[in-house]
């Protein structure tokens, strides 16, 4: 009675539903940072608490249960939402628990692209970098037995026997000889590869609080996810700045908190230096993201920033994105300055991020031009 | 389909013979070898590979496969209540595993065949499930997968709202049509005109008319008695299209088929575990296999701290019953023994144990099993306790080791599968064909977010506003969904005599 592989269809259907569910709730996922905390190498775990079938049931925390084991009344059995183990047999009750689904980053990016209507990026520059891949797509007449191609061998033998008149349809026995043998072999294929650099800069002066940094952290996850889906190779680098700038690793980027003044130009200078020294313009697609609460030390410094952007950064970059995260302390001046100088500039995008809910729209603004 | 190896076939024959000698009485059982992928697939379909298509089977499969890949769990055995019964053996299990599973399966099939609560289940369910699958696939072709699946989701969210005892009880007669009642005339005796006033006095006629009007009015409120089988009520009265009605009836039928498995989980697993141990250790295994067996058995019987394992509880209770009936530790004389030492050494050598456990497997379900055979001595020997959630500490904590508490909490959690009792109270609520459901409140509140979603599901079937009476924070509460929004209002809560 076993009828197999029917499950494939239902499994695909489940995946589809999951996808739809993520898509519908993308704004929520983006604002809550639920996904970013559960990232593995190539997959993320997406919690889907309500994909089960709802039924009338008791509020569990009122119900309690019966267990077995050592311990005195008052002893703890553990913490958390779910009860430690239900005595109630539930043979016909399926799937009443929350579900966590693995989604590949690639698929997540695809969902994100569809939902945010992000255009695909046409990488600029010469595709000079190449990778070489081995693929088992060729056939040879010599090779190890483990790679013997049965069907091709048989065909060759059949051809030979028909051609030489040895083939007898009434007694269709095919005997391959040594020269009929065919083996699988690999071909080397070269794939052009386009690389991209994402350079994150962030103001870490006192007014950028934990919540502001969390917003940047979540936003950068989604930016990474999207750009990774568009390029074969991605490098991410991180610069923090207050009155001076330094390059740090990702962890430090999101953890550091300084006080004191802010000189945005310090970061832009450092960024420019990195670009000039390490990333040739015609080989790299460069994405610059700068997050701050909009306070800069002086009008003079802002002037320097504009100059650095115009003469140094913009000619080298695909995109320059400035995200201004609202904080209770900042004056929010910087975004106005950028707008004043670069309004209408194709490769400059600014976005105000009021709170976590703003992440969704901000990403759409940043990546919506497909540059 | 792969064939069983001759070695396994021989083992099956051997175990079958021993099981029969012990008095087990089972349907013909067909064993099929499967690999773990097939096992996961079959298990995802609740044992029926021919079942209708639905995404949740895919979800189940994803979880089972992951759990297997991560080495967290493995399904050893799968058996279907059918005549003949089907059982699946996992290829690659070692021989002692296979022997354990085979013996376990025969005991399950004996339980299916003989336990009273299974007596009304469809023994041709394998065919029936395939038939359901074909019908639903046809609807998918016509209505599209989305529509059909959504409707199945809707039905499944109420598939616990059935009357678990209804297969055994005739509860109600035919529904009365209110229109018909209203049109009925008061019967008159034949009389000549001048006599009519005396033979059929006006006062009597009026009285009868009033009575009939009242009946008609009552009939307008249907069901006349609270209806426990909400699925049936909807099937009979909701404005469903043909294919919807058919799917609802299929879901209801499957819910009834699976119900006894939920009602007898502890007993059924206990019974099977009792027999696999008995058969293997006394008759099948040789010395070299005992360690392996102990290893498997201890895994089956293990429980995490604070958990209650139905296999372990069930088998321990069956053994306790057997010992008590062997020694005569039951009845009035026994109950009156107070002296601990006398209780311990009590043995009237009645030898009624075996007979008693066979009787118990025939007549009881989990609720009556626990109610009658869970003794204070047993509970304390098995270290049982009740636990609950402490809001202050945010921890689950041991609450009590008092026997009465343990027993009543356990019975609560088993009664109606530990689910709320819901009735249809009025199909013409507010005189506007709205639906009123009633939650028979017994101390535990409903989980609100789930309740809201179920009301939405029922709305999709009933197509008019749906309300539910329940209690929250010691006040009566009416939760309503009108197709657009949820409303809640406090109402006096009146207990129904159900």
Image: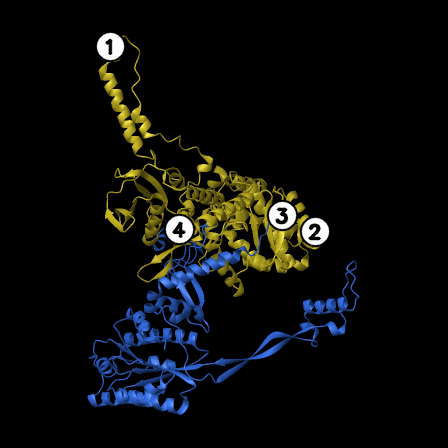
Chain colours: A blue, B yellow
**As drawn, is B95 to the left or to the right of B337?**
right
Residue in the foreground of this view, choosing between A185 and A72: A185
SS label for mark 3: strand
Comparing A250 with B95, the one in front is: A250
Q: Residues within 10 Å of mark 3 (few under 14, many from 20)?
A: few
Instruction: Check residue B30 in the rendering and tell me which mark sits there, or answer none.
Output: 3
The 10 Å Cα crowd at callout 4, few under 14, some 14 to 19, many 20 or more, is: some
Foreground disc of the pair 3, 4: 3
Give percent across and percent down for residue B339. 47, 45
Where disc 1 sits, the SS reads helix
Report, in whole angstroms, how far the alpha carbon at label 4 lies from the one at label 2: 50 Å
Task: Check disc 4 and report the residue beneath it.
Answer: B402
Is residue B243 shown to the viewer in this render?
yes
Separation of residues labelled 3 and 2 (CA atoms): 14 Å
Q: Label 2: which residue? A: B10
In the image: residue A157, left or right of residue B183? right
Mark 4 or 1, nearer chain start:
1
Q: Chain of mark 3?
A: B
Which mark, residue B198? 1
Residue B369 percent across, percent down from the top left: 48, 43
Task: Point out the tag, 4 or 2, that comes first from the N-terminus.
Answer: 2
Q: Residue at x 42, y 62 (%)?
A: A19
Tell me whether marks 4 and 1 sit on the same chain. yes
The residue positioned 26% from the left and 76% from the top of the image is A325
Front label number (4 vs 1): 1
- Label whose residue precedes the other's in the sequence (3 or 1): 3
Can marks 4 and 2 be said to lie on one chain?
yes
């Amino acid at each position: 009675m076993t009828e197999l592989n029917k499950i494939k269809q239902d499994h695909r259907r489940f995946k589809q539903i999951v996808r739809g569910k993520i898509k519908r709730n993308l704004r929520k996922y983006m604002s809550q940072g639920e996904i970013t905390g559960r990232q593995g190498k190539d997959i993320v775990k997406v919690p889907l608490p309500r994909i089960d079938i709802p039924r009338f049931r008791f509020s569990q925390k009122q119900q309690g249960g019966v267990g077995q084991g050592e311990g005195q009344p008052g002893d703890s059995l553990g913490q958390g939402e779910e009860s430690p183990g239900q005595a109630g047999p539930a043979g016909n009750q399926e799937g009443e628990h929350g579900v966590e689904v693995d989604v590949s980053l690639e698929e997540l990016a695809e969902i994100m692209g569809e939902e945010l209507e992000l255009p695909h990026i046409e990488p600029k520059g010469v595709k000079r970098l190449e990778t070489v891949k081995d693929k088992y797509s060729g056939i040879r007449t010599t090779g190890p037995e483990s790679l013997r191609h049965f069907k091709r061998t048989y065909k060759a033998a059949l051809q030979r026997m028909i051609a030489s008149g040895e083939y007898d349809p009434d007694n269709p026995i095919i005997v391959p000889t040594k020269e009929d043998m065919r083996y699988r072999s690999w071909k080397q294929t070269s794939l052009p590869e386009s690389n991209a650099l994402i350079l994150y800069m962030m103001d870490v002066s006192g007014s950028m609080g934990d919540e502001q940094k969390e917003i940047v952290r979540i936003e950068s996850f989604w930016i990474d996810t999207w750009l990774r889906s568009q390029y074969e190779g991605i490098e991410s680098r991180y610069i923090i700045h207050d009155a001076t700038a330094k390059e740090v690793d990702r962890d430090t980027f999101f953890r550091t908190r300084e006080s004191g003044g802010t000189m945005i130009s310090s970061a832009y200078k450092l960024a420019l230096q990195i670009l000039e020294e390490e990333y040739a313009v015609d080989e790299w697609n460069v994405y610059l993201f700068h997050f701050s609460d909009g306070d800069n030390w002086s009008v003079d410094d802002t002037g320097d920033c504009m100059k650095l952007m115009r003469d140094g950064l913009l000619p080298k970059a695909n995109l320059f994105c400035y995200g201004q995260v609202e904080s209770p302390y900042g004056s929010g001046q910087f975004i106005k300055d950028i707008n004043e100088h670069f309004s209408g500039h194709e490769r400059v995008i600014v976005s105000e991020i009021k709170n976590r809910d703003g992440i969704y729209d901000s990403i759409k603004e940043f990546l919506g031009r497909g540059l | 389909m792969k064939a069983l190896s001759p070695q396994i076939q021989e083992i099956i024959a051997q175990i079958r013979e021993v099981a029969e000698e012990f008095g087990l009485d089972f349907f013909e059982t067909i064993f099929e070898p499967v690999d773990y992928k097939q096992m996961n697939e079959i298990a995802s379909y609740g044992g029926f590979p021919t079942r209708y298509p639905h995404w949740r089977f895919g979800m189940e499969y994803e979880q089972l496969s992951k759990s297997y890949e991560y080495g967290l769990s493995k399904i050893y055995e799968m058996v279907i209540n059918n005549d003949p019964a089907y059982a699946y053996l996992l290829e690659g299990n070692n021989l002692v595993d296979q022997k354990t599973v085979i013996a376990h399966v025969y005991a399950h099939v004996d339980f299916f065949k003989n336990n009273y609560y299974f007596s009304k289940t469809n023994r041709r369910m394998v065919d029936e499930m395939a038939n359901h699958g074909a019908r639903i696939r046809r609807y998918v072709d016509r209505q599209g997968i989305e529509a059909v699946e959504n409707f199945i989701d809707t039905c499944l969210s109420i598939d616990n709202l059935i009357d678990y005892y209804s297969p055994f009880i005739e509860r109600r007669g035919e529904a009365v049509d209110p229109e018909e009642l209203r049109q009925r005339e008061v019967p008159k005796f034949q009389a000549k005109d001048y006599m009519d006033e005396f033979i059929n006095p006006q006062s009597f006629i009026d009285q009868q008319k009033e009575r009939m009007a009242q009946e008609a009015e009552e009939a307008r409120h249907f069901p006349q008695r609270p209806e426990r089988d909400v699925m049936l009520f909807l099937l009979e009265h909701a404005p469903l299209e043909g294919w919807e009605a058919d799917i609802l009836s299929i879901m209801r039928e499957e819910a009834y088929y699976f119900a006894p498995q939920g009602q007898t989980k502890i007993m059924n697993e206990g019974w099977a575990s009792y027999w696999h141990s008995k058969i293997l250790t006394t008759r099948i295994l040789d010395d070299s296999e005992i360690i392996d067996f102990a290893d498997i058995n201890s895994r089956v019987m293990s429980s995490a701290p604070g958990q209650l394992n139905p296999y372990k509880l069930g088998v321990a209770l069956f053994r306790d019953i057997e010992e008590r009936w062997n020694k005569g530790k039951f009845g009035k004389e026994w109950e009156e023994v107070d002296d601990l030492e006398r209780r311990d050494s009590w043995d009237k050598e009645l030898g009624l144990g075996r007979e008693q456990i066979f009787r118990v497997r025939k007549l009881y379900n989990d609720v009556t099993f626990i109610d009658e055979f869970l003794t204070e001595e047993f509970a304390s020997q098995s270290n049982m306790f009740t636990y609950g959630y402490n809001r202050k500490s945010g921890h689950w904590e041991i609450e009590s080791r008092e026997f009465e508490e343990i027993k009543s909490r356990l019975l609560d959690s088993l009664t109606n599968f530990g689910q709320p009792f819901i009735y249809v109270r009025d199909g013409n609520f507010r005189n506007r064909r709205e639906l009123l459901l009633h939650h028979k409140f017994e101390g535990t509140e409903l989980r609100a977010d789930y309740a809201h979603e179920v009301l939405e599901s029922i709305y999709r079937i009933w197509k008019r506003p749906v309300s539910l009476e329940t209690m929250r924070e010691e006040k009566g509460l009416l939760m309503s969904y009108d197709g657009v929004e949820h409303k809640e209002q406090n109402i006096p809560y009146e207990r129904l005599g159900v």
